[in-house]
């Protein structure tokens, strides 16, 4: 079984999408990323440049500290790692809501 994946990042202090945020995708048991991408102007990554992914446990790693530093701000979390189980052949959407001192995520639609 295979699945597809997207993400969307919003910066909560400004209420705007987090454009140009670097994100890496790690696969089951993977120490090396399967793919890396940067969010678009709307804070989204829709295409990872990979074929459909086999179901399993994956990690999205968001480089939030580097994103804030590029804007002249400091944050508390160097990276946000979101581990999730893609157990079904379907599309998964994993949003991240963030600010410099906190974050939240959920399984989107």
Image (cartoon, grey):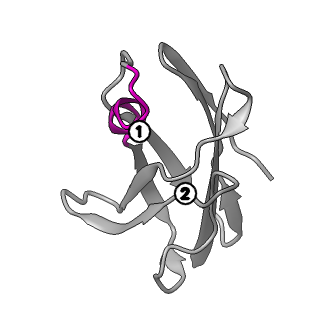
Q: Residue 6, image x and y in percent?
A: 63, 62
Task: Give the magenta range.
Answer: 63-73
Residue 35 position by quadrant = bottom left
Residue 91 position by quadrant = bottom right
Q: Residue at x 54, y 82 (%)?
A: 52
Q: Residue furthest left?
A: 31
57 part of magenta stretch: no
Residue carrying label 2 = 39
Q: Residue furthest right?
A: 109
Q: Local crowd at mark 2 within 10 Å, few (<14), some, or many (≥20)?
A: some
Residue carrying label 1 = 67
Residue 68 position by quadrant = top left
Q: Residue 72, image x and y in percent?
A: 38, 26
| 76 shown above or below 85 | above
| 92 shown above or below 102 | below
Q: Residue at x 60, y 61 (%)?
A: 40
| SS for callout 2 | loop
Q: Residue 45, image x and y in percent?
A: 59, 62
Front-most of residues 14 and 37 = 14
Q: Is residue 107 left or right of residue 73?
A: right
Q: Residue at x 50, y 86 (%)?
A: 51
| 47 shown above or below 83 | below
Q: Residue furthest front?
A: 72
| 45 shown above or below 43 | below
Front-most of residues 79 and 89 = 79
Picture quarter with the N terminus: bottom right
Q: Who comes first in sequence, dot 2 or dot 1? A: 2
| SS for callout 1 | helix
Q: Local crowd at mark 1 within 10 Å, few (<14), some, or many (≥20)?
A: many
Q: Residue 19, image x and y in percent?
A: 57, 50
| Spatial CA span between label 2 and label 1 | 11 Å
């Amino acid at each position: 079984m295979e699945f597809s994946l997207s993400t969307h990042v919003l910066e909560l202090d400004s209420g705007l999408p987090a454009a140009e945020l670097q994100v890496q995708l790690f696969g089951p048991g993977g120490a090396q990323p399967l793919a890396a991408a940067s969010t678009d102007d709307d804070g989204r990554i829709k295409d990872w440049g990979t074929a459909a992914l086999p179901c399993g446990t994956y990690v999205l790693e968001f480089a939030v500290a580097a994103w804030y530093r590029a804007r002249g701000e400091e944050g508390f979390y160097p990276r946000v790692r979101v581990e999730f189980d893609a157990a079904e052949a379907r599309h998964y959407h994993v949003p991240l809501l963030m600010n410099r001192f906190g974050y939240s995520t959920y399984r989107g639609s």
